[in-house]
């Protein structure tokens, strides 16, 4: 599959701070790609370089084959950016903002049906003549999405789109992002909500201190975490567990036990065997795989300790 | 691909900038016109018998072209500086920076809007007074030339001020410590040649003097210095300022990180 975004050895330094240290990354066309990292990891700097809002000190980025510096016009036509902050122009209403934004991309009346469709899809039709300042937080966020899509870009960058929004709107935005993806758009998502990346993204890159510490399919990344959790429902309230299990028990309640097992070193069959030998009767069990949050914390901690 | 012009993008950005000040026309057009009329009343009442100007030209007629130009200069500067700075403050500038609009197109759109506002204020003042004051207009083409060059030059200066400024206080400093002294000390209210030699020489270094002297010549047919010098000086000042502004935009200074 050809790549929508190709990032090659990108460096960015702000005075003494090395915000990006040689990031290399390919984002395939049609993919739903997550860019994760703690605050200050360099996610926004990278997004801003892709968008042409920040200039890299070194390296190259192309969007659908167009260099964002040398061939910036076509790169910008291909990109729709939903910014993290609720940016606005207080002088114009929703429809005017959309028409102006389309105009900057050289689009005129022929684009108006698409503006109507965007307003409808994002439930903004009734607010089309309202000023940005009179919109609720959720509506402002939806307007920013409409502004990013007004020129029908093939690649959409969502920079923390659900930051500070309520659960209902978050779900609605997820649905909309999925719809965009199904319609063939390449989506690059940065988010603080790891469950969001886990639910939406096929592939994830994790940045920390300007370096990429992980890049993999989401399912591979989840499998990379060394531990998983075994939940056991017990017949009685036991107190004496085999010594070999003691350091694996992370939670104990009456008739319930939670064990943390190493993916490679601990065998479930072996654990059950030990329990049977100790006359501990198990009536039910289930396994929990790590969440992206746990993988993320694990990788960040690994980075810190190294 | 880099060098073609996005004409529609340029036009829409220009239109947006005009639309922006038009939505608050009371503040951006009517108030400046009223200000100039107040200046006119105060200065002609207070100074008309004390300041000698050209023979056979009364002080009110001498003063008016200068006052019109003063309004043009201040409003053209205010238009581009306030628009760009406000967009920087609320980060709305991102909508333009994300679009396929070049530094030159950005510059032309903002300068175009500054010219429109400068001309509207200038024409507004002219229309308000022609029914009461017999103001000749000898070279209408030249009057438009100086009005357009002045608006464009100050529009460019407004862009520079907005780019460098981090708070409204900085914009006010540009306005109060650069634009205001240069406009007031450019011969709006008096003849430069009547000043003591040192101050007269200093005034000849003020680019606004050439705009005002040339503009006054367009109305009265008389000027302190040869109008060709004013045309050349104003034109050169505009070209130098334009090159600097487009270069500054191209560097992305304080606009693109």
Image (cartoon, coloured by chain):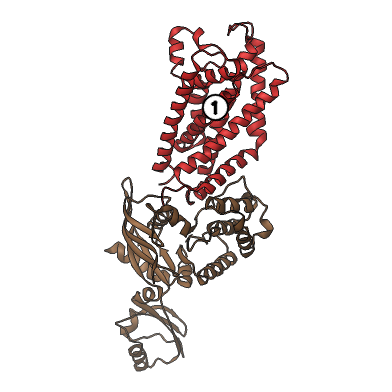
Horizontal side, residue A55 vs residue B117: left or right: left
Where in the figure is residue A165, as x and y percent of width and height?
A: 56, 61
What crowding class fits label 1: few (fewer than 14 Cα within 10 Å), some (14-19), or many (20 or more)?
some
Q: Is B152 drawn above or below residue A228 in the view shown?
A: above
Q: Quadrant of residue B112?
A: top right
Q: Is A28 drawn above or below residue A237 in the view shown?
A: above
Name the foreground residue: B132 vs A160.
B132
Chain letter for the part of the structure drawn in brown: A
Q: Which residue is mark 1?
A: B145
Name the foreground residue: A14 vs A195.
A14
Horizontal side, residue B194 vs residue B57: left or right: left
Q: Is A290 drawn above or below residue B201 in the view shown?
A: below
Where in the figure is residue A266, as x and y percent of width and height?
A: 32, 84
Residue found at the very far left of the displayed protein: A306
Looking at the image, which residue is at 62% across and 50% down?
A: A96
Q: Chain of mark 1?
A: B
Chain letter for the part of the structure drawn in red: B
Looking at the image, which residue is at 38% across and 59% down?
A: A62
Looking at the image, which residue is at 38% across and 52% down?
A: A69
Name the foreground residue: B236 vs A33.
B236
Where in the figure is residue A85, as x and y percent of width and height?
A: 51, 53
Horizontal side, residue A127 vs residue A275: left or right: right
Can residue A299 be seen from the camera position used here? Answer: yes
Where in the figure is residue B200, as x and y percent of width and height?
A: 46, 11
Can residue B92 be seen from the camera position used here? Answer: no
């Amino acid at each position: 599959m050809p790549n929508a975004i190709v990032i090659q050895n990108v460096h960015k330094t702000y005075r003494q701070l090395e915000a990006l240290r040689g990031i290399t990354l390919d984002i395939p066309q049609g993919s739903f790609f997550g860019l994760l990292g703690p605050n200050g990891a360099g996610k926004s700097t990278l997004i801003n370089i892709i968008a042409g809002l920040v200039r890299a000190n070194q390296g190259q980025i192309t969007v659908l084959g167009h260099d964002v510096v040398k061939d910036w016009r076509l790169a910008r036509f291909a990109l729709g950016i939903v910014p993290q902050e609720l940016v606005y122009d207080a002088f114009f209403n929703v429809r005017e903002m959309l028409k102006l934004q389309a105009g900057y991309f050289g689009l005129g009346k022929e684009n108006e049906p698409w503006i109507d469709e965007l307003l409808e899809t994002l439930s903004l039709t009734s607010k089309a003549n309202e000023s940005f300042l009179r919109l609720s937080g959720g509506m402002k966020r939806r307007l920013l999405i409409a502004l990013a899509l007004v020129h029908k870009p093939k690649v959409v960058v969502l920079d923390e789109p659900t930051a500070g929004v309520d659960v209902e709107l978050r779900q609605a935005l997820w649905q909309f992002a999925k719809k965009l993806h199904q319609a063939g758009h390449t989506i690059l998502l940065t988010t603080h909500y790891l469950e969001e990346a886990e639910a939406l993204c096929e592939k994830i890159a994790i940045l920390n201190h300007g370096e990429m510490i992980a890049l993999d399919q989401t399912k591979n990344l989840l499998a990379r975490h060394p531990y998983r959790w075994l939940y056991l429902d017990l017949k009685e309230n036991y107190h004496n567990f085999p010594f070999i299990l003691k350091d694996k028990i992370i939670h104990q309640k009456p008739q319930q036990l939670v064990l943390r097992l190493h993916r490679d070193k601990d065998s479930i069959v072996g654990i059950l065997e030990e329990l049977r030998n100790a006359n501990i009767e198990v009536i039910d069990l289930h396994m929990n795989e790590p969440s992206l949050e746990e993988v993320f914390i694990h990788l960040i901690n690994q980075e810190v300790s190294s | 691909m880099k060098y073609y012009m996005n004409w529609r993008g340029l036009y829409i950005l220009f239109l947006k900038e005009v639309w922006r000040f038009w939505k608050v026309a009371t503040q951006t057009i009517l108030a400046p016109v009223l200000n100039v009329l107040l200046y006119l009343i105060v200065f002609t009442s207070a100074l008309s018998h004390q300041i000698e100007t050209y023979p056979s030209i009364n002080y009110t007629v001498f003063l008016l072209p200068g006052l019109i130009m003063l309004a043009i200069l201040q409003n053209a500067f205010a238009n581009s500086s306030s628009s760009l700075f406000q967009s920087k403050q609320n980060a709305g500038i991102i909508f333009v920076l994300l679009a396929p609009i070049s530094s030159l197109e950005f510059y032309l759109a903002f300068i175009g809007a500054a010219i429109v506002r400068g001309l509207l204020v200038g024409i507004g003042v002219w229309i308000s007074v022609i029914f009461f004051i017999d103001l000749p207009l000898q070279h209408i083409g030249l009057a438009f030339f100086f009005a357009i060059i002045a608006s464009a030059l100050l529009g460019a200066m407004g862009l520079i001020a907005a780019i460098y400024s981090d708070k409204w206080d900085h914009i006010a400093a540009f306005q109060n410590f650069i634009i205001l002294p240069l406009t007031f000390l450019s011969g709006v209210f008096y003849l430069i040649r009547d000043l003591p030699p040192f101050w007269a020489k200093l005034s000849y270094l003020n680019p606004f003097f050439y705009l005002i002297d040339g503009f006054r010549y367009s109305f009265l047919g008389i000027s302190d210095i040869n109008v060709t010098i004013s045309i050349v000086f104003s034109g050169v000042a505009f070209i130098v300022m334009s090159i600097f502004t487009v270069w500054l935009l191209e560097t992305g200074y304080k606009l693109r990180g």
